[in-house]
Image (tube, rainbow, N blue to C red):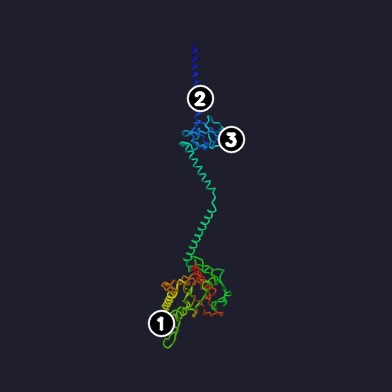
Amino acid sequence: MERQRSFSLKSTRFVVFSFTITSSIIFLTFFSFRVIKFTPFINQETHFQLSKPAVNVSLKPLTVQTLTGSRRNFTAPNAKNLILIDTPVNKLDKTSGFSNLSVSGDIQKEKNDTQAPKDEASKGDGLNVTSLSRGEESVPAPSLIEVQSNERLQEKKIGAASVEKIELPSDQQIKKENVRAASVQKVERASNKRIEEKKTRDCDITNGRWAYDESYPLYTNTTCPFIDEGFNCMSNGRLDKHYIKWKWQPHDCDIPRFNATKMLELIRVEYYVSHFLVHEGKARVGQKRVQTLRIDSIDHGSSRWRGADILIFNTAHWWSHYKTKAGINYYQEGDQVLPRLDVSTAFKRALMTWASWVDKRINPRKTQIFFRNSAPSHFRGGQWNAGGHCAEATQPLNEISGFSYPEKNVIIEDVIKQMRTPVTLLNITSLSEYRIDGHPSIYGRNKRYSSNIQDCSHWCLPGVPDTWNELLYFQLQSKKE
């Protein structure tokens, strides 16, 4: 009887257990059907994060990279219906060796993970899952809406970048760009030209040095038949030729090489001799008629100066002669001959007469006016008639530290500053002071001078005066531009 009851009880338990199992299977089947039925199909790449392997995930060939560098491969059958698994994220799973996983790819929920062969990890649509740092706090996985939004934004950026890379400019755009580039280059060239012109205008051409140049001279005594005998030193027997090889080189700019043809086109040279710029005449002093210098009256040839495009004046040397220096019964103002007048005072009054005539008679809008100041002499041991000499000089001076600026030059500059008409000063004094080697000395005639008569005030040609012409040419070119 006891055995009978015991068996009955066991049978009852078995029936209850079977009923429970059956009900569970039916419920799970119904629940799975409902879940599969109402889960939308996702036909795009999905990103999600996992922590612990709380849910078994079956993937296409899946590669897992752990922190230790080992790789684990998983595989899953292709699935048409996809399930997005959004699981809670916890801290580091110490048993698995990594915390958060970032997974990209198609996934399908299954009950068991199936290990894939090692050589299939590199096939087809294999997924690469890389572990993050150990011991870090995990962050919640993104929702489906966030994933889809981020992917659409990323695709839009990639699409825009592709368009920017592939799209080619049209012919019209290329033409506009070429025009713009040409315009920029034109502006740059104009700017550079203005800078160069400013540099040229600001250049002090009197500040420089004499440089030996084998390309000089610009002409020779055989190619130019117009050299005055007194200045034709080579024809007069001068053997050394270094004096014709020197070029003046300013420190701040370059002087363009002299172009004689262009120079003649610019000036078409008319030349008038006027030693003093004021009128030379005669007046009665007592019972005698003597030569005088009318320092209050312009030279009578001045009527031919008017209307010129370019006027170049100079005077200085003749004011060093005995009569002008002595000033006794020589200078005249009106009808009065002054019994005695200092040469510097006479020189200034003569220049003021010239300046007044220029301001009254010359139209500065038509005529450019230049004034060349005095050239130095290099007599050593006395004046020209008292044993002065320079024949031994064959090289320019290295320095002119003891050089004193002539008083006549100071007077010229003071008078020019007071004029209404603009006048350009051609300052050739200092640069010519170096050229003690450039005078005719004993080679001023076909027959040599005696040792006590040398010309150390005029200049050999070719020679230093060619540099004065180069400076004038430079000034004319600068003003023309």
Report the front residue among 27 and 114: 27
How many C-alpha atoms fall within 10 Å of the one at disc 2: few (<14), some, or many (≥20)? few
Looking at the rendered structure, the kind of residue marked 3 is Glu
Q: CA distance from mark 2 to mark 1?
A: 146 Å
Where 147 falls versus 419 (above or below)? above
The picture quadrant where one finds residue 297 is bottom left
Report the front residue among 454 and 227: 227
Q: What SS does tag 1 mark? A: loop
Determine contact: label 2, label 1, CB under 8 Å: no
Q: What SS does tag 2 mark? A: helix
The picture quadrant where one finds residue 359 is bottom left
Looking at the rendered structure, the kind of residue marked 1 is Gly
The first of marks 2 and 3 along the sequence is: 2
Q: CA distance from mark 2 to mark 3?
A: 37 Å
The answer to whether residue 363 shows anywhere in this view is yes
Where 79 falls versus 239 (above or below)? above
Q: Which mark is residue 26?
A: 2
Say whether residue 63 is left or right of residue 337. right
Image coords of residue 104 (percent x, y) = 52, 37
How many C-alpha atoms fall within 10 Å of the one at disc 3: few (<14), some, or many (≥20)? some
Closer to viewer: mark 2 or mark 3: 2
Where 306 falls versus 3 (above or below)? below
Q: Which mark is residue 334?
A: 1
Q: What SS does tag 3 mark? A: helix
Looking at the rendered structure, the kind of residue marked 2 is Ile
Residue that label 3 marks: 120
| Residue occupying the far top of the picture | 1
Q: CA distance from mark 3 to mark 1?
A: 125 Å
How many C-alpha atoms fall within 10 Å of the one at disc 1: few (<14), some, or many (≥20)? few
Image coords of residue 334 (percent x, y) = 40, 82
